[in-house]
Amino acid sequence: MKKLLPVYKNESIPKLQSESGPQHPKKSFYIETYGCQMNVSDSELMTGVLTKAGYEITNDINSANVVLINTCAIRENAEEKVLNRLEHLNAIKRRNTEMVLGICGCMAQHMRTMVLEAAPYIDLILGPDAYRSLPQALDSINSKDTFVNLKLDKSEDYADISPIRKDGIRAWLTIQRGCDKMCSFCVVPFTRGRERSLPIPMLVKEVESLVDEGFKEVVLLGQTVNSYYDGTHNFGDLLFAINQVEGIERIRFTSPHPSDATKTMIDAIASCEKVCKQIHLPLQSGSTKILSDMHRTYTADEYRELVFDLRNQIPNLAISTDIIVGFCGETEEDFQKTHDLINEIRYDSAFMFKYSDRNGTLANRTLKDNVPEEEKIRRLQTIIDLQYRISHEINQKRVGETIQVLVEGESRKSKADYFGKDDTFKTTVFPRKNAQIGETVNVKVHTASANTLIGNVTS
Ligand code: 5AD
């Protein structure tokens, strides 16, 4: 097992292998984003920081003066993907010797300076709490040193920094950073530090500006979004407050933690007309024993009851989830409990993963990653097949219904079609005819697959 290196504060460390790098960083930047929506939101934040400092965004990686890779560390394959990509980036850097290459985000925080062993030509390593220092970091880069800032800072909420988003229909809004949950499998508390929330009045203002910029939908983001607490108000209060903002049409959020689901939150989803009737509620495992080893802080029965309460108060609520199979010590019987709970709850959709041992986590330090890889693969495939069947059946029931779809853009498969989402976040495709991007249209569904609804605009 690799040892974690100490956290480096705002300091430059010598490159493992010195190469000639840029002396005077110029002014165009390109950001490549991996991982979750929080990373998308962080890239928008970095865009805000750099634009304010006089840099200009470019879509051309080959000519960019600064290339930043915003990374994910959640599973080993997320890091492998970036490590593979780095070779290609180095080839670009060799052609464009002026280019500054930076690794940002969770993988930077997780691998720390070990990333230099794989890619000694990296000029910059920044953790998620260090984006404010980007312009200074770029100013201080020289050919010999790699600038490193991996300081986690509980007081850093970027409250004064305006993110710059791509134009569109849906805006991501970070309402909380960090995580206090300490699930034993998860690297996030180590890569993103402790939890902190932005105050409600500020977030309401932010949503008002999103409306002014033309956004129709806002997705509130937090690692455990419903543990939001600004010192006075909780997550339910925030939903009620944002629901009042004139002009915003839809409100979603991701991802809540089952243990932080409160009555106010359920009341808010049920009664706020703009809050979509859709929830992503990570289960992780259907076995109480495994949930306990995962430090999830709820039992399978408590989760069941929560789903029961949600469905009781919010008819037609769409529920999706995250599942991990093959966690340390997961027996066939434990796995069967997960399988059976998926079958019982009948999720609309699910993200399903094989357990990936992550350096520094509690499970990594205290439990054995003892489910063989082939068995992890078998279990994963079993629940993927199950969920596919369930999603297909649920979507088939929508055939014949007329649903309200917020039009997002051209369908990937045909220029003649538009796509959008309904309230439950189902992707819906339909011939564009007179529909306009950004408007909500009625679509009569005539065909459904496990992932998509297809129909025609009726008004
Ligand atoms: N291995 C596999 N899946 C993981 N997740 C988080 N950590 C791991 C890990 N070590 C999954 C969880 C989480 C989602 C974002 O990623 O299901 O909810």
Image (tube, rainbow, N blue to C red):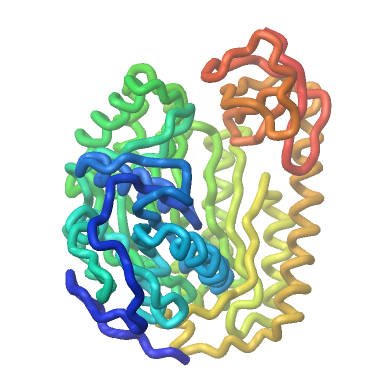
**Residue at screen point 33% across, 45% down:** 28
Residue at 63 percent of width and 88 percent of height: 370
Residue 400 x, y percent position in the rendering: 80, 22
Relative to 59, residue 73 above or below: below
Name the side, left or right, on which 354 lies relative to 397: left
Quadrant showing the C terminus: top right
Residue 124 position by quadrant: bottom left
Task: Depth check: give the residue in front, 198 or 266.
Answer: 198
The residue that appears at 57% across and 23% down in the rendered structure is: 406
Q: Can residue 226 be seen in this snapshot? A: no
Residue 424 visible from this viewpoint = yes
The mark total stands at: 0
Q: Position of residue 180 (x, y in %)?
A: 32, 65
| Pick the front one: 85 or 181 | 85
Instruction: Name above or below for residue 197 compared with residue 296.
Output: above
Q: Residue at x 48, y 67 (%)?
A: 90
Please name whichever residue, 41 or 228, is drawn nearer the observer in this view of the structure: 41
Q: Position of residue 184 (x, y in %)?
A: 45, 76
Side of 317 where 430 appears, left or right? right
In the depicted structure, whether residue 55 falls above or below residue 178: above
Q: Position of residue 110 (x, y in %)?
A: 39, 74
